[in-house]
Image (cartoon, grey):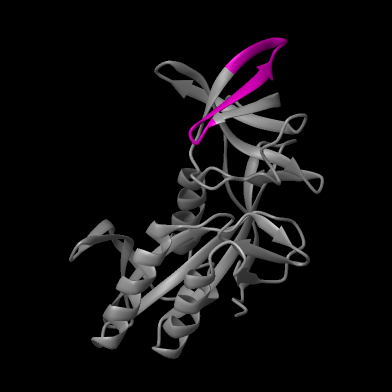
């Protein structure tokens, strides 16, 4: 494991209920409170009543931000913003074998009607990358998505279009499940997305992944696996 960064102000909580896509009710310090959740997936395996969670201070009307859930003796990072921060940190330190030699040029890149997460530059060329969160366990694999995703299909179609037009494009997964050996599409949740992933690989879209974990003791986010393959 490689240390990435630490977090300040972390508190433990008990998950009581997912109120909606972006809000979770928790028990923190003996009091009921609401926490924001930055992940649009259903997360039914992780964010469920009775599970221990980890919160950061929130902002605005929500005093807490649920960013991880206890899983496998550590913390599974479900917050996509924190996953992106971990990806950027690992990228900047050249820790990701599938992206060795690349650095971030832009974030939130508008390409036609779509917005992709990153434009990277390296090796004398650019690479457009869309980052996805895969935190559903499927045996010894991490699976994406956990519900139908029109947005995910839209991004894949754009990556296929870019690759077909001669540009380099990549779908990169961040997972946070201890012990997984790779990532796979969840064809039961979204059969069309699975079909698009198969087509994307055939059309030259690159695919890769990495695993991170939250260690509650030292309150650190670590890179648990820098190079996870994608199985179709």
Residue 50: x percent and y percent? 78, 29
Residue 102: x percent and y percent? 38, 72
Magenta part, dominant SS? strand
**Can residue 1 be seen here?**
no
Going by the image, does 131 lie left or right of 78?
Answer: left
Q: What residue is at 68 percent from the left and 39 percent from the top?
A: 69
Q: Is residue 84 above or below residue 161?
A: above
User: What segment is highlighted magenta in the picture?
Assistant: 20-33
Q: What residue is at 48 percent from the left and 44 percent from the top?
A: 40
Going by the image, does 138 lie left or right of 146?
Answer: right
Residue 136: x percent and y percent? 66, 56
Q: Per the image, is 24 magenta?
A: yes
Residue 56: x percent and y percent? 56, 28
Q: Per the image, is 152 magenta?
A: no
Name the one closer to the observer, 97 or 41. Answer: 41
Indicate the quadrant containing the C terminus: top left, top right, bottom left or bottom right: bottom right
Going by the image, does 56 lie left or right of 16?
Answer: left
């Amino acid at each position: 494991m490689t240390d990435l960064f630490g977090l300040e102000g972390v508190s433990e909580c008990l998950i009581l209920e997912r109120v909606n896509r972006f809000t979770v009710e928790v028990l923190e310090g003996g009091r009921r409170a609401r926490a924001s959740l930055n992940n649009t997936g259903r997360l039914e395996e992780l964010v469920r009543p009775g599970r221990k969670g980890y919160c950061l201070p929130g902002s605005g009307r929500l005093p807490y931000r649920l960013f991880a859930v206890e899983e496998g003796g550590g913390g599974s990072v479900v917050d996509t913003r924190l996953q992106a921060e971990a990806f950027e940190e690992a990228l900047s330190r050249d820790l990701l074998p599938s992206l060795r030699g690349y650095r971030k040029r832009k974030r939130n890149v508008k390409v036609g009607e779509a917005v992709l997460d990153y434009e990277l530059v390296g090796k004398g060329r650019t690479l457009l990358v869309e980052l996805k969160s895969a935190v559903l366990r499927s045996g010894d694999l991490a699976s994406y998505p956990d519900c139908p995703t029109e947005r995910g299909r839209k991004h894949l179609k754009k990556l296929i279009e870019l690759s077909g037009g001669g540009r380099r494009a990549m779908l990169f997964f961040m997972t946070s499940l201890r012990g997984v050996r790779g990532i796979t599409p969840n064809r039961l949740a979204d059969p069309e997305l699975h079909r698009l992933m198969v087509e994307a690989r055939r059309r030259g879209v690159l695919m890769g992944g990495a695993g991170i974990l939250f260690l509650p003791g030292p309150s650190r986010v670590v890179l648990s696996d820098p190079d996870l393959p994608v199985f179709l």
